[in-house]
Image (spheres, rainbow, N blue to C red):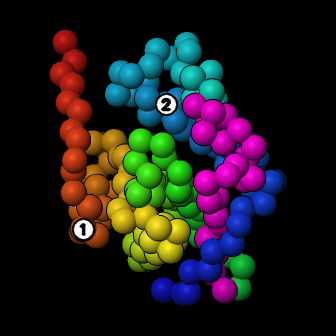
Amino acid sequence: MEELVLRRMTAAEFGAYRAWAIPQRAEAKVSVGDWAADEALELASREVDELLPTGVDTPGMLLLTAHTSDGETLGMLWVGLDRPDQRDTGWIYYIKIEPQHRGKGYGRALLRRAEGLAARRGARAVGLNTFGSNTVARNLYESSGYEAVLIAMRKTL
């Protein structure tokens, strides 16, 4: 595995991330029954805009691009440092490794970097959410020492 380098996301990268993330979030929320399909894009857009009102310049949020030392993009990381409900907890809103780079240890490396960034800014813990069906992510988080603190369950009738 090549070295993972982090840098602040550019405005153009944020635009591309936002354009990708909103439909992804909408689809995921529809798939678990949280949102109706006809309103999901609007709700996802509103959610992102409320959390990131000034994009990459939003205070308390770190939006970073991960790349190799030669500049090849590996993925991205979004870490929140100012959750009003959990002042001493960093929050991983999104962690993504590009499909062609998955399974090579970059996800684990990016997770460790997120933890280090949060700790250096005073966090005593790091939290995140993942969908129950995302077994790859769940395995990564559990093998990295994350524990379930809240489990939401649903039965489709």
Q: CA distance from mark 1 to mark 2?
A: 28 Å
The residue identified by callout 1 is: 145
**Which residue is located at x 66 percent, y 86 percent?**
69
Amino acid at dot 1: Gly
Relative side of 20 to 14, left or right: left
Q: Is residue 57 magenta?
A: yes
Q: Position of residue 85 (x, y in %)?
A: 41, 41
Q: Residues within 10 Å of mark 1 (few under 14, many from 20)?
A: few
Residue most extreme to the right: 12
Mark whose residue sits in front, 1 or 2:
1
| Residue in the foreground of this view, choosing between 89 and 102 | 89
Amino acid at dot 2: Glu
Q: Which residues are magenta?
A: 47-69
The residue identified by callout 2 is: 27
Look at the image and tell me whether residue 3 can be seen: yes
Look at the image and tell me whether residue 114 can be seen: no
Instruction: Work out whether 66 lies above or below 50.
Output: below
Q: Position of residue 157 (x, y in %)?
A: 19, 12
Q: Position of residue 146 (x, y in %)?
A: 26, 61
Q: Quadrant of residue 132?
A: top left
**Which residue is located at x 62 percent, y 80 percent?**
5
Q: Is residue 9 magenta?
A: no
| Residue in the foreground of this view, choosing between 62 and 140 | 62
Asked whether the residues under the numbered discs 1 and 2 touch, taking CB atoms below 8 Å apart as contact, a structural biologist would say: no
Sooner in the amino-acid sequence: mark 1 or mark 2 = 2
